[in-house]
Image: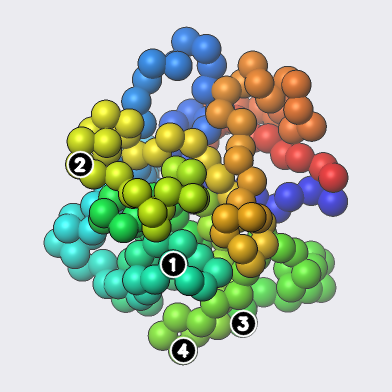
Amino acid sequence: MKYFIIVLIVSINVTCGLLLSADDLESKWDSFKVTWGPNSFNPEYFVKQPRTIAEAKQNNYQQISDQCEDIFLGQRFMKPNDYGVILIYDNQGTIAGVQMGIPASMITDKFYKYSTQKMFNRDTIAGVELYILTAYFVDPRTICQSGRNPSHLNHEGTGTGLWLQNGSNPIRDSIEMPLYDNTVNNTKWAKGVCLPTMGMSNNKSR
């Protein structure tokens, strides 16, 4: 069975591929944009997201959780009724990840068993039951402990890696993804093609 993560990865869309080449080792992830589209000049696509809680509040994001004791880590923010982009911040108010929510009413198990997939966690926000996909941009163990201050954000960029939550325990069940194309060759990840403005598509069978 293949991990069903392409929807989340397309929603993140950071560079021409989350996987980098050796030439990109020194590059910095200095922005965070969501929503892929064929026309990069269309303002509805590649929308820049706030990387601190202060910026999120200035952009009308509302806090929906502020604790680290449930199935998700960090302080979560979203715009009213926009479940497609839920931003995660650490205990210092710095970007730490992103979630995509899909209303359960829109999903059926007829063609794909969403209800049995560990990567799709269930949550209820504002009375709406959702399937949630979660990606962390920093080691999940740091989000509620040390966090990152503005200096770290400036030095490290939006994130230091990519972890996909594949279960109800965000520490134990988060899977660290390979960042560089030369490391993917030594794993079970199958390399796909690189599409303009979308990036490299990879999948993993198990």
Give the SS element for disc 3.
helix
The numbered mark at residue 150 is: 2
Q: Pointers 4 and 2 in contact (CB under 8 A)?
A: no
Q: CA distance from mark 4 to mark 2?
A: 34 Å
Q: Report which quarter residue 201 is drawn in.
A: top right
Amino acid carrying mark 3 in the image: Ser
Amino acid carrying mark 1 in the image: Cys
Q: Which residue is mark 4?
A: 127
Amino acid carrying mark 2 in the image: Pro
Q: Which residue is mark 3?
A: 105
Q: Report which quarter residue 185 is drawn in.
A: top right
| Label 3 vs label 2, nearer the camera | 2
Q: Is residue 148 above or below residue 126?
A: above
In depth, the one of 201 and 158 nearer the eye is 158
| Label 2 vs label 1, nearer the camera | 1
The numbered mark at residue 68 is: 1
Disc with the residue nearer the chain's start (2 vs 1): 1
Q: Is residue 39 above or below residue 194?
A: below
> Percent position (x, y) of residue 8?
56, 52
* Residue 92 relative to residue 185: left or right: left
